[in-house]
Amino acid sequence: MENEIHQVIPIQPAPYSRSRQAGEAQTVLDHIVDDFQENPAAMQYFYDLFRGVYCHGDEIPHSGKLVGTTCIQAPEELIYAFGATPVRLCNGSYHYDQRGADFMPAKSCSLVKATLGMLSSENVIPKIGKPDLVVNPSTCDQKKKSSAMIEGMGYSVYDLEFPNVKESEASRVYWRRSVREFAEQLRKLTGQRLTRAKLKAAMAMTGRAQAAFRTLHNFRRQTPSLILGKDAFLVTNAYFFDDIERWTAAVEKLNAELAERQAAGFRAVQSKAPRVVFTGSPPIFPNLKLPLLIEEAGGVVVADETCSANRMLYDMTAVDEWLVGDMVDSLADKYLKPCTCPIFTRNDDRKRRLLDLVDQFQADGVIYQAFSGCQVYEMEYRSVAEEFNKAGIPLLYIETDYSPDDQGQLSTRIEAFLESLKNRKKRHA
Amino acid sequence: MSAKPMLQRLRDAANEVDFNRFRFWFQLVAFVLFVYGGYLAIDLGSKLPFFSCGYNQEGRAGVCYLLPLQHQLGRNWAVLFSIASLSILTGFLGFALWFIVLNKGWCGFVCPLGTLQDWISALRRRLGIRFSNYTHGQFAQLTKIKFVLLALLILIPLGVGGGFFSHDMSPPFCLICPARMILPIFTGDLSQFTIDFSSKTAVVMTALGISVTALFLVGSFVKKRFFCFFCPMSALHYLISKPALLKLKKDGSKCTRCGDCYAVCDMEIKEIADDVTTTNIMTDDCTLCLKCVASCPETGALKATFAGIPIFVSTEAGFIKRMNKGCQHGK
């Protein structure tokens, strides 16, 4: 016992900004900002936002109760109408993916592993604070089974019942009821009443955000492109956690700059750059691996069909009579009917949507990302590929995860694909 | 950037119009014209394809075709099956010519009884009461009723002419049509609110008429365009709608099936949102009110065409303008 060391030098906890996790975000963000030329000046807001939140661990203030959502199907207008703040919990960090792998089955998808990994850690980044309620729509199996696990981590979880079939009338009725029950749950959580004025104001707020998104989306039709896809993904990723009004103002500013670029005949890429539509598993910062590989290799992502961008913000709600009941039902329909998530039995809408995007955005090809373990995207690939074969549109299917290890081989495949698109373009010209 | 050409500006203005307001005023003018036009000696004939009710004898600016049609079909069979019945064919031709211009747009924009239901709906909305819907199953059953009524509207007069039914049953549809009782009220004529005790049949028919009118008033308060769902005129329209000039077109490739059009549809027509293959999307229940076009956020997915020329096209800009207006409205 004499040998006992009496003086223990306490280990100083390293600041977050020097952690490996911050480093991961830093590397990607530096790449996004520094390795591309002539980024729009208005993107600085988003670069700063991500640097603050992901690299320095800045806190994100919010008002009212915090409601975490694990899917785009949780109607955020309702959350806002109850004076609460929604935050999308879906996470893109490899650090959390590895953490989740400690307690999740090996074959689960990176997104679910990372989201649960994040929720299970003490210092959650982005630093949003502990959600007062986690809303988990019953979409894919992995998310469904997450409910109990998230609850086990000490969160209060609400299972938002979501149908697996969307064509039938029964599913519409079921889902509308489900959404009304969700509103009831929010009433219990916040102690507030859902009024016509509040819901209308919430819808006006998201409506303005969606209109701003659509304007940005439309600018991307321009050939050659005015803005790169990596920036567009960063913009929509910010929507996950940023204050919605600040976000909208920042996007409107970006749109104004794009309008100037358009008037000045600006080109963000070479005129021959292959135009790609991105579909499948969602790129979420810092996992912008594929979009970045595509644009490094000289391609440009002109549009996407993913739940971290287009699918989250595109579809807008129409209401006939602005009474609470009609507004809630219209919202419910908006969150179910146009959704192109592969968890549904059939997905003709997704195929039609992709074909329309390729047509409208004059895309040369489509890149389909499936996270390993995301069975529904993996299975749906076949039918999508058949459709594209028929239409004569080249499609590259990439199965990957959050790990940076496969970057080398992926970049080879992507370069080859883009090269073939270029050749094809030349032949057609 | 150069200024847009005149035609394009005109198109944009039309596509971004405050549609509900436009339609309100259009309907109001049409209502006044057809309910009070008679005082200005306006007479547009008796072949009108909507309920400009003939029983509104002083104010009407024309007569609903169903009235003369039933009278003509109710002729004695000896007359009916003679050369004199050529007038039935020419009458129908006149009706068809009127109809062809606006298609079912007569229902959504002109029919006074339709307009009246929209006003009753507006009253309900102002009271903050929500509308009711049919379930899917109810809809599928009820939608057939208008065809049954159309068949009866033709068969009963034939039966009357053939001596099978009492003359007190003629004209059968008019006797139960709510327009017969309600539209004359607007010119101060309450005489239709009576039960005719001259015969048993007359008692039954007029009592039925009063009940249907009561049902109409209650129904259209609860349900948007309650009566149009059962309207035999609407059924007749649908049967001859092929050559009509005004058409509702859908481009399924641009549709995301978001259901915004269905959400605003007074007639609860699901096909408008779910059907992505039919291009000519007007169904038998449609009133061509074009609210679906106004509430569609996908540019070019829905459009109204006149003789093949697009006159009102769904656009993203128009949608945002209209819906944001709705949002600010109650703030």
Image (cartoon, grey):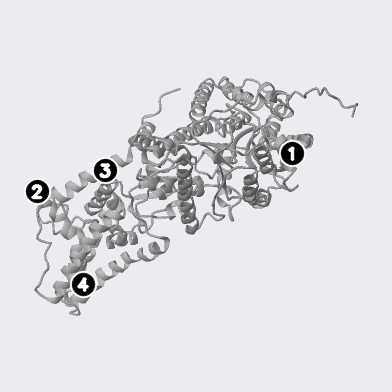
| CA separation in Å, label 3 and label 1 | 61 Å
**What crowding class fits label 2: few (fewer than 14 Cα within 10 Å), some (14-19), or many (20 or more)?**
some
Name the subunit of mark 2: B
Q: Label 1: which residue?
A: A98
Q: Nearer the viewer, mark 2 or mark 3?
A: 3
Secondary structure beneath label 1: helix
Report if the CB atoms under discs 2 and 3 are less than 8 Å apart: no
Name the subunit of mark 4: B
Q: Label 3: which residue?
A: B24
B74 displayed left or right of A115: left
Q: Nearer the viewer, mark 2 or mark 1?
A: 1
| CA separation in Å, label 2 and label 3 | 23 Å
Q: Are marks 4 and 3 on the same chain?
A: yes
Of residue B268 and residue B94, the one placed in the foreground of this image is B268
Asked if one can make out residue A178 in the rendered structure from this viewpoint, the answer is yes
B184 displayed left or right of A319: left
Q: Amino acid at mark 2?
A: Tyr
Q: Amino acid at mark 1?
A: Gln
Q: Amino acid at mark 3?
A: Phe
Quadrant showing the C terminus of chain A: top right
Q: Are marks 2 and 1 on the same chain?
A: no
Report if the CB atoms under discs 4 and 1 are less than 8 Å apart: no
Q: Earlier in the sequence, mark 2 or mark 4?
A: 2
Of residue B41 and residue A115, the one placed in the foreground of this image is A115
Q: Label 4: which residue?
A: B157
Q: Label 2: which residue?
A: B39
A271 displayed left or right of A10: left
Secondary structure beneath label 3: helix
